[in-house]
Image (cartoon, rainbow, N blue to C red):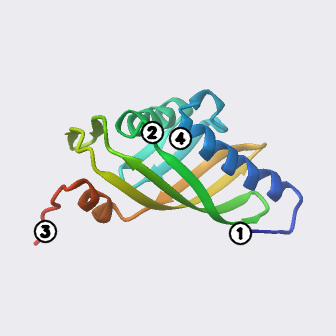
Amino acid sequence: MTLIQDKPVTATHAETIKTWVANMVKGDLDKAPYAEDAETSDPTGKFKGKNAILGSFKAWKTAFPQATAEVTNQIALGDQVTSEVLYKATHTGPLASATGTVPATNKPVVLKVMQITSFHNGLIQRERSYYDQTDFMNQLGITVPAKL
């Protein structure tokens, strides 16, 4: 379901997200619709600049080369798009992270992601992605130590 209100540009932005998600899981990173000075954040960290953002996507693509993704819901208003994305993949490559590299576990994962995306001049300027990182690690078979 896609809910679009207000300005005609919102339909274009919502479609840009759908197209980018499809291209990203295929590894077509040259089609990334980010501004050169864009900023993104997700549970793994913050990324500033298109090159840093693409580096984060390359790390995911290396770890999950055969992923699929589907935009399951969107709400668009003006230059803002909120999207629910369902990713499915098997962890067959090393996953680089700030705390070290996780070797391939060969386990399937289903990742439910919420993205809040802001556009400027037709490009993504800022994007915040949220998902349950503990659930993700559990699916990989990685125990997350409790914090006391």
Residue under numbered circle 4: 25
- State the separation of the CA atoms marked 2 and 4: 8 Å
Residue under numbered circle 3: 146
Task: Using the image, tell me which numbered label, if any, was put on residue 1.
Answer: 1
Specify the amino acid type for callout 3: Ala
Specify the amino acid type for callout 2: Gln
Of the image marks 3 and 1, the number of the one nearer the N terminus: 1
Q: Are marks 2 and 4 in contact (CB under 8 Å)?
A: no
Of the image marks 4 and 3, the number of the one nearer the N terminus: 4
Assess disc 3: are there few (<14), some (14-19) or many (≥20) residues with their C-alpha within 10 Å of its C-alpha: few
Front-most of residues 126 and 84: 84
Residue under numbered circle 2: 66
Of the image marks 2 and 4, the number of the one nearer the N terminus: 4
Of the image marks 1 and 4, the number of the one nearer the N terminus: 1
Of the image marks 2 and 1, the number of the one nearer the N terminus: 1
Q: Residue furthest toward the right? A: 8
